[in-house]
Image (cartoon, rainbow, N blue to C red):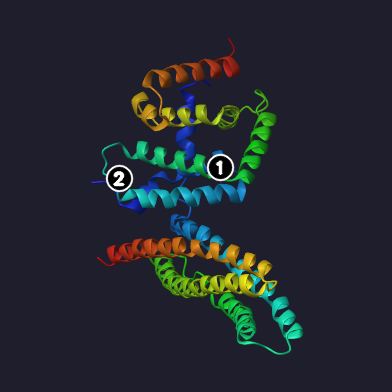
Amino acid sequence: MNFDNLKDEWVKKINVTSVNVEYNLTSLDGELKSLNKKINNRDLWVLFQALAAIPFVIYFAITHSSKSGQELMVILTCLFVCLLSPCYYWSARKPSLKNLNSMHGFLQSEEVRLVKQIKITKYSLLLSVFGWLFIAYSVVNTMLSNNPLLPLILVEIVGYWWYLKEMKIYNKCKYLLKDVTTQLDDMKV
Amino acid sequence: MPPSFEALISQNIGRIQYIARRYARGEDSEDILQEILLQLWRSYKTFEANSSVETWLYRVALNTAITWVRKSAKQKKVSQIVQMLHLDVSLPGQESCQGAIFEQFMDALNDADANVLMMYLDGLPAIEIAAVIGVSANAISARISRLKRLFEQTYIGE
């Protein structure tokens, strides 16, 4: 065998019959995979925040028998985070891809999934606005009344810093949806 | 007019799969394959057939594979392990068929050399390989000559 024979071998290697190319094309789902990874990480943060808020609710409930307006606000806020975060977590669960046996089916599934993801992300952006308001309130409250809220504030700051990334996810979803819709339109033609 | 995307992928799936397997094994290579297809899909709209399909494809596929490997520390480790495995199996003379020799030779090369060789075997001119790799055409020619010598020394004898 000489060096030129390598060409023959190379041709053999690349001339594989396109084993289920339709299936391979569904690998365009790769972008969604990375997106979903980010979403999963985000969901964990939400869950973490919800769990982190629980001890503070208990703490305030036990130690403050006569509740002022401020303290009530803190408790309600914590409850809000506790209750809403799991709701959000469950609502953000991804619809599974179906009908993957054709490019058209794949794109349709993608379209459905992206539309849902955009809705979910809008919701989480709303939640993040609430989060920033809560942080502002907590900081002021801590300064005024020296409440032991600092750990919760830190948790929230980190958590809502993560939410800033939501905007990126949102934009990515929109971008992908545009791509997918265009492809579907092309197929119709 | 460039071919349709699906036709293009069908025609070149072998090349893409080989590149993906070159940079990782098992599920990781499937991930790379996915990423390459995605990037090809995205850049397909801007592909205007100014260069050959192969040149465009190699550029996108190699850049994507390299970026993917660099991004992931885990993949880096896997890649190192794979390279070590390659070293273990790349002793010449153990396999006799041409396909095995081809595999052995490719496995023994570093990524840069293997990429050049793939494109050379695909019939791309040195100037186009140079455009993909980002070095001069002369450097590509010299590298190919060196690879030829290496192959002959290893498998044919001096």
Q: Observer-nearest residue: A33 or B114? A: A33
Label 1 CA crowd tier, 10 Å (few <14, some 14–19, many 20+): many
- Residue lying furthest right: A62
Determine the residue positioned at 50% across, 48% down: B33
User: Looking at the picture, how far across and down is residue A126, in whole percent?
Assistant: 47, 75
Q: Earlier in the sequence, mark 2 or mark 1?
A: 2
Residue pictured at 49% horizontal, 52% vertical: B34
Q: Amino acid at mark 2?
A: Phe
Left or right of A8 in this view: A50: right
Rendered image quadrant of residue B137: top left
Judging by the rendered image, the residue that carries numbered circle 1 is B69
Instruction: Tell me, yes or no, whether dots 2 and 1 are on the same chain.
Output: yes
| Residue A15 shows in the view | no
Chain under callout 1 = B
User: Of helix, strand and loop, which one carries label 1?
Assistant: helix
**Considering the numbered disc 2 on the image, is that residue within a helix, a strand or a loop?**
loop
- Observer-nearest of B103 and B134: B134
Image height check: is B96 above or below A96? above
Examine the rendering and report whether any part of residue B72 can be seen. Answer: yes
The residue that mark 2 highlights is: B47
Is B127 on the left-hand or right-hand side of B22?
left
Residue B29 is marked as: none
Residue type at the position of mark 1: Val
Q: CA distance from mark 2 to mark 1?
A: 25 Å
Q: Are marks 2 and 1 in contact (CB under 8 Å)?
A: no
Instruction: Pinpoint the chain carrying mark 2.
Output: B
Residue at the spot 56% in from the left edge and 61% down from the top edge: A37
Vertical position of residue B155 compared to residue B39: above or below: above
Q: Position of residue A75 (x, y in %)?
A: 65, 83
Query: Which one is in front in this view, the residue at disc 2 or the one at disc 1?
Result: 1
Q: Position of residue B56 (x, y in %)?
A: 35, 39
Q: Position of residue A108 (x, y in %)?
A: 40, 69
